[in-house]
Image (cartoon, rainbow, N blue to C red):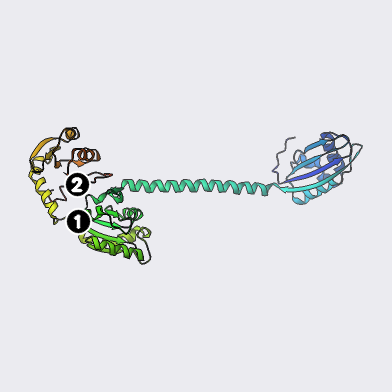
């Protein structure tokens, strides 16, 4: 009958027979010579009937005059019964007419092996789940960051890491590295620029000349050295440090907000009020103001030469193709968004300044001044 019990143990035995026998002879000896030794309830036939012993597996190896091999009994009894059955089989001394010897090699606890397999599989499941969870967490963070208006880009010829808000904001936050910018984005600040070393890049000096500057540096000794170097070449309006011994990237977003919010409130207020313009911005404001009233809400662009003479006025949709055939343009003023495609075409045309309603997320705008009407106090 088929074996339906739950295997608990594997009783493994080896045997040697002084003659040539078949597999059936070995099984017959196991059943026949153990019968009655341990009482009727312990007979192998009875144990198989009640699904306590499974099908006995026998492997044999025959030589010229002997037979040897292994026998395996799957059992679902307690360990005491297994031991008794094993001892009974070891007492077998004949297989047919030939002398033989059975020896117990092992009683394996199948459940222990199964437990190991279960634990191993559980570890695999946990690892797969953990990896998926981390991946999902990263994707969620990525979704949050991508949904936030600020992103990471680069600034200047040396491609310094920055968040895209530095172009529109009237004030910027100078930090030490890219990781600091990411942490500020988590806290809601998208106007940070990384210094990337103690030597202050020339492009930083140029940008700081047109904006209010907040230095937000690490709370260690190196942060102090960088602040000193920064102040020697840039006008720093507000000096901020992370907590002593802590780097800006290690601060929680809440702590970043606590440090920045209280210290930069006045700068935030300035961003919603008319600003004091520097001389460059004043001249650009005059240029834009002359055409703004006739340009606003037209979805058109105006090109001016170095004497502020109008060269042409076209729809923004036709602007890029128009720039490919024009020279002598110094200022480009448009009723729209300054895009990367427009910026690239303007570089080819030798334009020095572009003024529009908004600046898109740009990878690079070296050599061209970009301004919004809001920054110039016009809109």
Return the residue nearer the eye: 186 or 377: 377
Residue 27 figure quarter: top right
Q: Nearer the viewer, residue 139 or 90?
A: 139
Give me the residue at 33% from left, 55% from top.
196
Q: Which numbered disc flags the more N-terminal residue, 2 or 1?
A: 1
Asked whether disc 2 touches disc 1, contact meaning CB atoms under 8 Å apart, the reply is no
* Residue occupied by mark 2: 370
Q: Residues within 10 Å of mark 1 (few under 14, many from 20)?
A: few
- Find residue 295 and name its label: none
Dot in front, 2 or 1: 1
Dot 1 falls on a residue whose secondary structure is loop
Question: Residue 148, can we see it?
Answer: no
How many callouts does the rendering have? 2
Say if 167 sits above or below 220 in the image.
above
- Closer to us: 95 or 244: 244
Asked whether 12 or 50 is in front, the reply is: 12
Image quarter of residue 247: bottom left
Q: Helix, strand or loop at disc 2? A: strand
The image quarter in which residue 326 lies: top left
In percent of width and height, residue 178 lies at 34, 53
Can residue 290 be seen here? yes
Number of residues whose C-alpha sits closer than 10 Å to that of mark 2, classed few (under 14), some (14–19) or many (20 or more): some
Percent of width and height locating residue 250: 38, 59
Q: Which label sits on residue 209? A: 1
Using the numbered discs, state the Cα–Cα distance from disc 2 to disc 1 in whole angstroms: 14 Å
């Amino acid at each position: 009958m088929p074996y339906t019990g739950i295997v608990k143990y594997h009783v493994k035995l080896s045997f040697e027979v002084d003659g040539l026998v078949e597999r059936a002879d070995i099984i017959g000896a196991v059943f026949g010579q153990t019968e009655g030794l341990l009482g009727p309830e312990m007979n192998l036939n009875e144990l198989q009937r009640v699904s306590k012993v499974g099908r006995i597996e026998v492997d044999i190896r025959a030589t010229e005059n002997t037979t040897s091999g292994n026998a395996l009994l799957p059992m679902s009894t307690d360990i005491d019964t297994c031991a008794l059955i094993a001892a009974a089989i070891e007492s077998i001394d004949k297989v047919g007419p030939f002398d033989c010897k059975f020896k117990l090699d092992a009683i394996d606890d199948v459940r222990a092996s199964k437990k190991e397999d279960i634990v191993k599989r559980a570890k695999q499941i946990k690892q797969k789940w953990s990896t998926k969870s981390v991946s999902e967490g990263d994707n969620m963070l990525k979704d949050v960051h991508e949904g936030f208006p600020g992103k990471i880009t680069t600034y200047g010829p040396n491609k310094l890491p920055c968040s895209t808000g530095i172009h529109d904001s009237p004030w910027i936050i100078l930090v030490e590295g890219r990781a600091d910018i990411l942490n500020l984005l988590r806290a809601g600040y998208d106007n940070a620029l990384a210094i990337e070393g103690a030597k202050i890049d020339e492009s930083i000096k140029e940008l700081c000349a047109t904006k209010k500057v907040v230095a937000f540096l690490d709370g260690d000794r190196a942060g102090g050295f960088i602040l000193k170097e920064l102040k020697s070449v840039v006008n720093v309006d507000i000096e901020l440090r992370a907590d002593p011994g802590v780097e800006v990237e290690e601060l929680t977003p809440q702590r970043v907000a606590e440090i920045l919010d209280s210290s930069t409130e006045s700068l935030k207020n300035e961003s919603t009020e008319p600003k004091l313009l520097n001389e460059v911005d004043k001249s650009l404001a005059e240029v834009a103001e002359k055409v703004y009233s006739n340009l606003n809400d037209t979805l058109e662009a105006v090109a001016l030469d170095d004497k502020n003479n109008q060269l042409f006025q076209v729809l923004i949709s036709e602007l890029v193709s128009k720039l490919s055939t024009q020279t002598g343009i110094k200022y480009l003023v448009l009723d729209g968004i300054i895009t990367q495609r427009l910026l690239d075409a303007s570089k080819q045309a030798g334009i020095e300044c572009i003024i529009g309603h908004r600046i898109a997320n740009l990878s690079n705008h070296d050599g061209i001044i970009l301004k919004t009407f809001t920054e110039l106090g016009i809109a």
